[in-house]
Image (spheres, coloured by chain):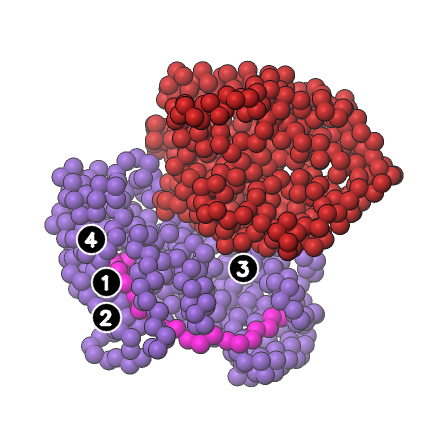
Chain colours: A red, B purple
Amino acid sequence: MAAALRLKLDEDQLTNCMRCGFCLPACPTFRETGLEAESPRGRIALMKAVVDGLMEPDTAFEEQIDHCLGCRACETACPADVKYGRLLEQARDAIEDHTVRHRPWVRAARKAAFEGLFPHPKQMRLLGGALKLYQRSGLRKLARGAGLLKLLPEPMREMEAILPEAAFRGVVQRIGVRHPARGERIATVGLFRGCVMDVLFAETNVHTVELLTAAGFEVVIPPAQTCCGALHAHGGEADAARRLARRNIRAFREAGVDFIVSNAGGCGALLVEYNHLLHDDPDWREEAEWFAARAVDVSELLVRRGRPLDLSGPKPEAAGRPDRITYQDSCHLRNVMRSSDAPRELIRRVKGAVFVEMREADRCCGSAGIYNLTRPEMAGQILAHKMEHANATEADYLLTSNPGCLLQMKLGIRKHGGGRRMEAVHIVDYLHRHWRRAD
Amino acid sequence: MLAQEVVRELKDIVGDAYCRDDPQTLVVHSYDGTPMLQALPEAVVYPASTREVSEVMKVLSRHCIPLVSRGSGTNLSGGTVPVQGGVVMVMHRMDRIVEVDLENLTATVQPGVNTKRFADHVEQLGLFYPPDPSSMAVSTIGGNIAECSGGLRGLKYGTTKDYVIGLEAVLASGEIIRTGGKLMKDVAGYDLTKLLVGSEGTLAVITEATLKLIPPPQHKRTMLAMYRDLYGAARTVSRIIENRIIPATLEFLDQPTIRVVDDYARLGLARDMEAILLIEQDGDRESVERDIARIAEICRGERAERVEVAATAEQAQKLLAARRSALTALARLRPTTILEDATVPRSRIADMVLEINRIARKYNVQICTFGHAGDGNLHPTATTDARDREEVHRVEQAFEEIFETAVRLGGTITGEHGVGVVKAPYLEWKAGAAGIDVMKGIKQAFDPHHLLNPGKLFAKETRKRVVIDRG
């Protein structure tokens, strides 16, 4: 494994770290533990120690690399522009190829999910359908009543409780592939529908299309697209991520779009880095550059290029007074796609609503992909602290730009909300509620 | 590696979880913010109280094991790198703000408290703790005390030592001493408080500090002046002081820095400017407005090319951006950034900057200088690549000549960053042989067995001072 790490880790980046420590206050795991090893500076030092031969990459090393949320807040704080995200992916890639620490059932589950499920939209829809059946039919009540859910590990049990209703029919099945712009066409955009998004939040995808067309964009949803590959890239399966990237690039290229729009910060962040992912592939480098330059988040596109939406629809006064809204940044949208003003700008445009900035809204909520399932104690600790700040805003609605964050916030409200009325909603859904169609 | 029975003794004091000697822990405590310096400790302990620190010290003393105390490890002179092995003691668990005394205007804190968190807390209570080292979001009060950290407000408000009025510390023997107190005047014996501030962890381990607080300024204004002529900027600095105006900050960027910052931040800085001064004044509204107007006049009088006074807080942030992004811009040029600090009397700043630029050209290395013009504390910063040994050697030679120049101009080898390992070979140039002997005597009195942070401050051998022949 040491040899693989030496091969895969970017030595320039490892040398670039000045060890100034500016990343420490930005890092959630450092903030929670106070331990140097749980900080970006520490993790980089461990990687460098392995490359320099100072240390063997033992189980503790693998675990520590696993502890990182991958939120990349450190990159935003770093004066030297160390590409920590890249180092993390490279390290995990080398580790996964050589690790002996996964028990057989973990290995099997990873393979099933990463290769058999996420990359196959049809399989995802089947899962969605099965989940919906479970939720809608008496099965769920039965399982709860019989205490069967107690058999699940706690993080999964909690997740089950807050899952929205799943769907068999994704956005393409509901509204079709091509949607003309309202009024003069500003550009043609491809919607990245996502794998989890389309199963758990298909309606959000529909709303995204409606808002984009109203803002003057023609929307195409290429059916040949697939999972973005973020879970794979972050989980040490770089080759699998590259395969998915190629499929997506081809699908959107063939659709002939000007932009690729996503409504999930976690996905968007990998889409804008497809050029880096495929940098060493001479056949795909140019295509990947084309794609990465055009990947954009829906908030960013609406604010920077779209015609302003009429957000003076139904008065945002669910409790008989103006809605108080707060916003939790998607780490990947903020730190990788470098977008944090656009969502706030959009929220402020909702007539009659009051926007309240949450303290440390820029700090990770603990979802971090599937981190809240794989490392529930740390995720839970981070979530508890996050909810302290969220509750302090006394907001009616907590908006997010990513499905993972959204689920984690729902969980947080359930566990730590203390009965307050706060609802976690995707920003697109909230905007859609108060959007007035110009009919 | 530490003998198992010693590890057992330490674990019995701090708890099993808080004494670690696994490879991972050792690696992440083998460095600090100093480039190209790394040494593995034998164990790391995380004490939670003065009593635990004292007990640990007794064990280490008995076994003659060195101790390196550490806050966040952001120092730049090697002060927290365990170059002779031993135990690293991380003070982070002792991070309480014990009390803020609103009657006496003091605060008592544990050493591991984050400086910014402390400063913000004090601010919320309507008071002011001025020392603002650039590392304050990361560093701890204990670390600041050990290094006597400075910051941008040094000229007007002083540095860490001006605010430490009492300490509790553990000696190498494990004995606990208390110095000073909530007192503005105390001449009972030698001033051990001031001696310990800046002693770089070589005389004692600080376990509690009492800090003086002052009332906050009411109003603040920011301005920027650009100069085509370096001496114009230098004269401006002198004339401001001659006019009995002490600004809150008086920062400087030299031409190489300006170009790098402009490349990075695209602030539209004129690249042929030889100097930029960033000036801030705070205090009551009337005097601030009067001072800023006078300073602007002085700048124009010294032929400043452009003078901009910020009218709003946002504008002020824009002006500050140039200074704030200096380190970031420089750090992105090459992989290794060596941030040094050489201080001269204010009146010699222009000479020092010109010498630095000459020395950089002589050794064909890139050095950009920015810093605190108001107090003469400059930060010549070299950008290089640690893997290029040949270039690194030239950079080291350049810095040696820079330190020599600073001392020759009546200055010092370090204004804020400390001597540590990096500047130990040059300490004698500043302190003189007799000075070093006295310092060593003091060290001997505090720590006869040389257990506390060994290998720092006093080099095995002083570099020969080269007399530069400028023909």
Between disc 2 and disc 3, the foreground one is: 2
Drawn side of residue B429 relative to residue A71, left or right? left
Tag 4 and tag 2 share a subunit? yes
Q: Circle 1 is placed at which residue position?
A: B169
| Residue interval drawn in magenta | B200-224
Q: Secondary structure at mark 2?
A: strand
The chain ID associated with circle 2 is B
How far apart are the alpha carbons under marks 4 and 3? Answer: 43 Å
Q: Circle 2 is placed at which residue position?
A: B179
Drawn side of residue A364 relative to residue B189, left or right? right
Give the percent coordinates (x, y) of residue B189.
Answer: 20, 77
Asked whether A353 falls inside the magenta stretch, the response is no
Residue B290 drawn above or below residue B429: below
The chain ID associated with circle 3 is B
Residue neighbourhood size for the residue with mark 2, other residues' Cα within 10 Å, grouped as few (<14), some (14–19), many (≥20): some
Q: Amino acid at mark 1?
A: Ala
Drawn side of residue A144 relative to residue A193, left or right? left
Residue B176 drawn above or below residue B283: above
Between disc 4 and disc 1, the foreground one is: 4
How far apart are the alpha carbons under marks 2 and 1? Answer: 8 Å
Q: If the image is split into quadrants, where does the N terminus of chain B sit?
A: top left
